[in-house]
Amino acid sequence: MSAVPREDGSTLGVFDVRLGRVETFFNLVAAACIFVLMFLGMAQVLGRQLLDRPINGYIDFVELSMATFAFLGIAYCQRLGGHVRMEMFLKMTSGRVHWAMEVFGTLIALFVIAVLIWYGFDHFLRAYRLGDSTIDAELPVWPSKLLVPVSFALLWLRLLLQLAADLRLMLNPGAAPVAVPRPMTAEEIAAQEIESAN
């Protein structure tokens, strides 16, 4: 699947590009967190083995950073169509029926993500009000818990944009797809891999 944001002059195209920039930024923050955590892990091992001085609260740092790289890239992944999807019936459809099924699936996803945003934010508020912290280093956990509803809110916006794009294609199946993941052929995948290797 591929959905590189491209501004084609339409309102959907403009929103796709702008939302894509935010999603890319969130994804880069998640990647940077993984990179920093990798060096922190190396410092932990070397400090423990060579100096007998482990990093205080290392497990707490790892625990808090999990939300960063687990959730910040979720909207980016949705834009690329990288999530596992059950497409057995979708592949057998085309035209308006195909896009109507996409609309139905996106509506369900919007509802589920809205519920997760609501309860995720409630969970963050509870941790903030109680002053919840990790056991070892007593680091506050609310920033990590806040990332969950924020990341899901970005995903909800992506799904809302995708819903508008699906509705547009349902009404006019011959229109060029904008703001929807597009299935790639084997040739396109190979060409993309060759291009990224150079």
Image (tube, rainbow, N blue to C red):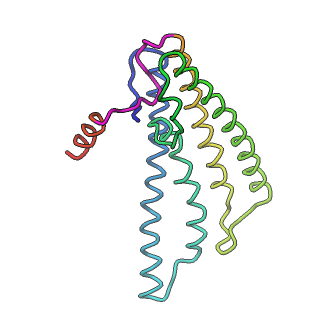
Residue interval drawn in magenta: 172-186
Vertical relation: 39 (above or below) 144: below
Residue 86 on the magenta segment: no
Q: Position of residue 153 (x, y in %)?
A: 62, 37
User: Farthest left residue?
Assistant: 198
Q: Position of residue 104 (x, y in %)?
A: 62, 26
Vertical relation: 172 (above or below) 179: above
Q: Quadrant of the C terminus?
A: top left
Going 53% across and 21% down the picture, which residue do you hit? 99
Tally the numbered discs: 0
Going 36% across and 33% down the picture, which residue do you hit? 184
Q: Quadrant of the N terminus?
A: top left
Secondary structure mainly formed by the magenta segment: loop
Q: Position of residue 131 (x, y in %)?
A: 76, 60
Residue 173 on the magenta segment: yes
Q: Position of residue 68 (x, y in %)?
A: 55, 54
Vertical relation: 26 (above or below) 11: below
Q: Nearer the viewer, residue 142 or 80?
A: 80
Q: Is residue 23 left or right of residue 129?
A: left
Q: Quadrant of residue 138?
A: bottom right
Going 64% across and 54% down the picture, which residue do you hit? 143
Q: Is residue 88 left or right of residue 3?
A: right
Q: Nearer the viewer, residue 109 or 71?
A: 109
